[in-house]
Amino acid sequence: MITKLLSLTSLCVALVVSGCGGNSSPDTVEGETTSSSSGVQGGAEPAKSLAAVSDARLAAALDEPQQWMTYGGSYDETRHSPLSKINRDTLQDLGIGWVYDMKKPRGVEATPIVVDGVMYVTGSWSVVYALDARTGEELWVYDPEVSGEDAAKGCCDVVNRGVAVYEGKVFVGIFDGRLEALDAKTGEVVWSQVTVDQSKPYTITGAPRVFKDKVIIGNGGAELGVRGYVTAYDTASGDLVWRFYTVPNPNKKPDGAASDDILAKLANETWGDTGAWTTDGGGGTVWDAIVYDSVNDQVLLGVGNGSPWNASIRDPEGDGDNLFLSSIVAVDADTGSYRWHYQTTPRDMWDYTATQPILLADLPLGEAGAPRRVVMQAPKNGFFYVIDAKSGDLISADAFTDMTWATGVDENGRPIEVPEARSLSEDFAVLPGPTGAHNWHPMSYSPDTGLVYIPTNIWPFLYSRPDPNDPVKSNWNVGYREDAGWPLEIPAGGIEGMRGMGGGSLLAWDPVKGQARWAVPFPVPFNGGTLSVASGLVFQANKGGELVAYDAETGERVWSHGLVGGPGAAPMTYEVDGEQYLSILSGWGSTIAMVYGVVFEDAVGPETGRVITFKLGGQGELPKPLETGIARSPKSQPLGDEALQAKGLRLFAANCQWCHGAFAISSGVLPDLRWSAITSTEASWDAVLRDGALSANGMVSFGDRLDKEETDAIRAYVVKQAWDAVARGEADAPAGTGADVGAH
């Protein structure tokens, strides 16, 4: 088994990171509030007042099941709908109602919001769309014009998971660090706040949440080195209300923030006084899960990984837990002050974020089976947690996947670690890998079945300490060898063998019994999020490009329909004029598609993001998939000797694979460099890699971090990969030889 893991994890050195992209951010600094209407396209105007959402309406969201007013369907974010017109008896009549093509390609991850017949949804590049929920007719579009230079800061594509709506406004977190309030009727900017230091590699990909006249947003960027926090702003004015930092200030002094007291009392002592965290921020970004618990009037924060991942570099002085990395933290909704925390992975070493979706529910776990309000999470580390929502006490933690890093949880709620996984005295294949046993993809909970439906991943990772005598330049901040286990020559049959070694599943989990009820396996990880409905169905899209309905009790596959692209988002449902609809986003991008083209047999064209909406009796058609149109042929003769190519392999692994794919094999999200014209001459290669000729498209210059010999080595490696594909019969040799095939 370990041999199999090692051969797979030679691929997986930076599986969790990717990004690149293209368009210009406002000249503002953190704390400035600006107003603008740039990028708005007007359209049809519906009769009703728009986004008339109040606290009372959000609190009673399940009383209006025809709406989908917040990211997870309700404050509890269970993603379960009481609607039932789409059921086993009517599924055969479910067809395409309408399809809306978004303006730009790349990954799409959002859950649409629907209020009073209007859909608000985001696509790639943080573009916001308002659509007629009945027909898909465009009402307005807002493009915040994120620049390519900012897009290059991202770990995992230029994605966005959605908006929040409240009292006539639409709130969106912009990839470059802005939080903006838009007029729900026109799409014009009401206010804009820069929430981060834009000179640092911060990004925003998560959906904001609204409650009690406040809108709250986190950020990402730990892979490149930042300090995490969340901020609550006044929904009317954009003024800052409170901020909570998830890790200490590197000098351990107060920030003048809501987190000051608890950091001084509890967290500071869990960090040493030296190490990379004192310069790189420590990580702990809250890039996805933020849930308002209306019963306890608190906000639950899912906190991310350390920066760098490797704790022996991040904080070399001791063995402290590094609070609040990889934790669920509860804070007071009005003040942001600390309530409680539970750390899923103390002193995280493996990018085991606790940013994954958080659900709230009442389970029969009290005395004599009385309902007990609980927090549920299935984070990256592979344990399913049930926690008391009021106190933060752990109720249960059970493994929902195979793992090599731990064997269980002790009586204190701490993982029982496998010593070799932490010491890394030798290279160690860790399962789950940094993509996690479950990532950002939404899970759902049905009160009818008592089951949680989790999109899981199976994908290990080879962790290897860096050699201080043989460092490799990288702009990523992980603290491990990013080329560990990479062979210069892929063995015969290696590509095919690598496919199928990972995968995923749709897992039905009983949170009371702490065990699986059923599972449906998939050959590829990172399949879409889930939706359960009162008619006893669970919907999920998969990377095979289809939307599937399963029996919620048994996992029986009862219906499917093809999609265009590779969906990762979760479906949602709503009703207008008595007619139930089912919508899902599909495009091509995000982590698995960008980094691991090797797991897909054929490259996919650069599909635009789409909103695909089904309804009973729908007779619409999907557009045809794009053709890649790529001539698979080397553009240069082989370059350099084996030593130069091996150097290029290491540099490519450390700097290029997150956008252009491991082994330089692209799935089509971004150009496959093996077939790119820029490899044909030294001048064209240097113009892009060293001079930044394509910076506006997101391909920023590497001239400030890599010297000429190093970028030449990367070119030599890419060209070698092209010729190796020819040798494997996967590409055609070019016509002509020598000077006829590029000057070099």
Image: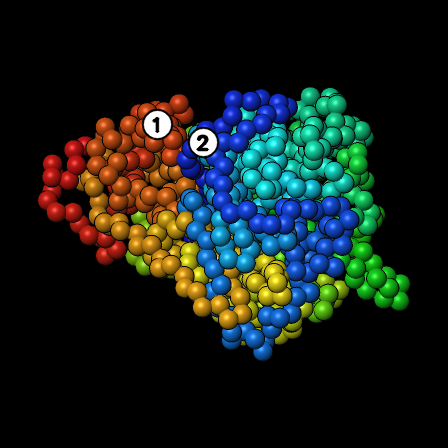
Q: Residues within 10 Å of mark 2 (few under 14, many from 20)?
A: many
- Residue at 49% of width from left, 44% of height from top? 43
Q: Is residue 206 above or below residue 388?
A: above
Q: Quadrant of the C terminus?
A: top left
Dot 1 amino acid type? Gly
**What number is the disc on residue 375?**
none
Q: Position of residue 316 (x, y in %)?
A: 63, 30
Dot 1: element: loop
Q: Which mark is residue 692?
A: 1
Residue at the outermost front position: 47
The answer to whether residue 325 is visible is no
Q: Amino acid at mark 2?
A: Ser
Image coords of residue 300 (percent x, y): 73, 44
From the viewer's perspective, is residue 685 above or below residue 609?
Answer: above
Q: Is residue 740 above or below residue 86?
A: above
Q: Position of residue 531 (x, y in %)?
A: 61, 61
Q: Which is nearer the N-term, disc 2 or disc 1?
A: 2
Q: Mark 2 falls on what kind of element?
A: loop
**Residue depicted at x 28% and y 27%:** 687
Query: Does 105 appear above or below 237?
Result: below
Residue drawn at x 63%, y 46% as measured from the top left: 50
Tell me residue 647's x, y (percent).
Answer: 34, 35
Q: Which residue is mark 2?
A: 147
Q: Nearer the viewer, residue 100 or 218?
A: 100
On screen, residue 508 versus residue 26, left or right, reads right
